[in-house]
Amino acid sequence: MPPFLFWLFASLMLVFGAAVVLNRNPVASALSLVVSFLGLAALFMSLDAYFVGIIQVLVYAGAVMVLFLFIIMLLNLRAEEGRRINWLAATGGIVVALILVIQIFSVIGHFQAARQTFPSLARSTTDDVWNIGALLFSNYNLPFQIVGVLVLVATIGVVLLSKREPR
Amino acid sequence: MITLGDYLIVSGILFAIGFAGVMLRRNLIIILMSLELMLNAANLSLVAFSRFRVSPAGLPNYNAQVFVFFIITVAAAEVAVGLAILVALFRARQTTDVKDISELKF
């Protein structure tokens, strides 16, 4: 991938990620989150991780965002109308986040491998779905089944939680 | 050329944005969205390292991508349960603001 595409998609992802936090209207936040996830999926594709990019679009930009928008619609949430900002908590949060960024920059600055470019692959197209599937069903078979049980438990939990209490 | 460090820095900034969202916002739905941003930042650095560690056969290290697959699955389950709790809370209290839910606060 040419470098300008990397910077384009990275800045798209970061700008709309910031828009998620800064928007007052929950619907606008959710739609910004979709654009941010699409930028992230493009970055996955630029790293030759096509399968992960595709499931990022399907699961996040598709299923999870529909769930968020559906709940916002169901609860009929409006934009928070000018509740006053708690300046102490706001500055505290921004300062802690900035310290985190500075820490990450300094760690990456001291990390030798971070200055190297990516080594080239043997072939330009990788059959990564086949490789990930083979790993899932051999080395990671037990975690895969545990995740299946987790999804079942989550399904039962959601049904139980959203059931109305009998009066 | 794009280095590994560029991806790691972008991932770190995305994590910080999500973290700031959790700290600053009081709407529970926005806090859940910021949690998703933080999980995705971790996914980005995992995939970058996977592409960086190329095996002698010339393939990326697929262990990290399997891990990303698991993270995406668990995050989807987490969002479903979180939103169900949110709906139950909204039915009981008619609010999604964390400032209005302070009975257990010390």
Image (cartoon, coloured by chain):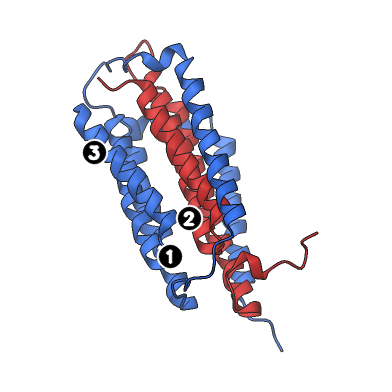
Chain colours: A blue, B red
* Residue A90: % across, % down: 56, 53
Q: Do the residues labelled 3 and 1 touch (CB within 8 Å)?
A: no
Q: Residue shown at 40%/49% (left/top)?
A: A18
In three-dimensional space, the C-alpha distance between marks 3 and 1, rounded to whole angstroms, equals 26 Å
Q: Dividing the image into 4 quarters, which one contains the C terminus of chain A?
A: bottom right
Instruction: Between label 2 and label 3, give the one nearer the viewer.
Output: 3
Identified by mark 3, the residue type is: Leu
Q: Name the residue under label 2.
A: B33
Outermost residue to the bottom: A167
Disc 2: CA contacts within 10 A as few (<14), some (14-19) or many (>=20): many
Disc 3, SS:
helix
Specify the subunit that label 3 lies on: A
Q: In this view, does A27 lie above or below B74?
A: below
In the image, A124 versus B16, the foreground residue is: B16
Identified by mark 2, the residue type is: Met
**Mark toward the start of the polypeptide (3 vs 1):** 3
* Residue A35: % across, % down: 31, 52
Give the left or right position of residue A24, taking residue A153 as reference: left
Outermost residue to the right: B106
Specify the subunit that label 2 lies on: B
Q: Are marks 1 and 2 in contact (CB under 8 Å)?
A: no
Instruction: Using the rendered view, name the quadrant where residue A119 is placed.
Output: top left
Q: Residue shown at 28%/35% (left/top)?
A: A45
Q: Mark 1 points at which residue?
A: A24
In the image, A105 versus B40, the foreground residue is: A105
Q: Mark 3 points at which residue?
A: A8
Q: Residue shown at 53%/27% (left/top)?
A: A103
Disc 1, SS:
loop
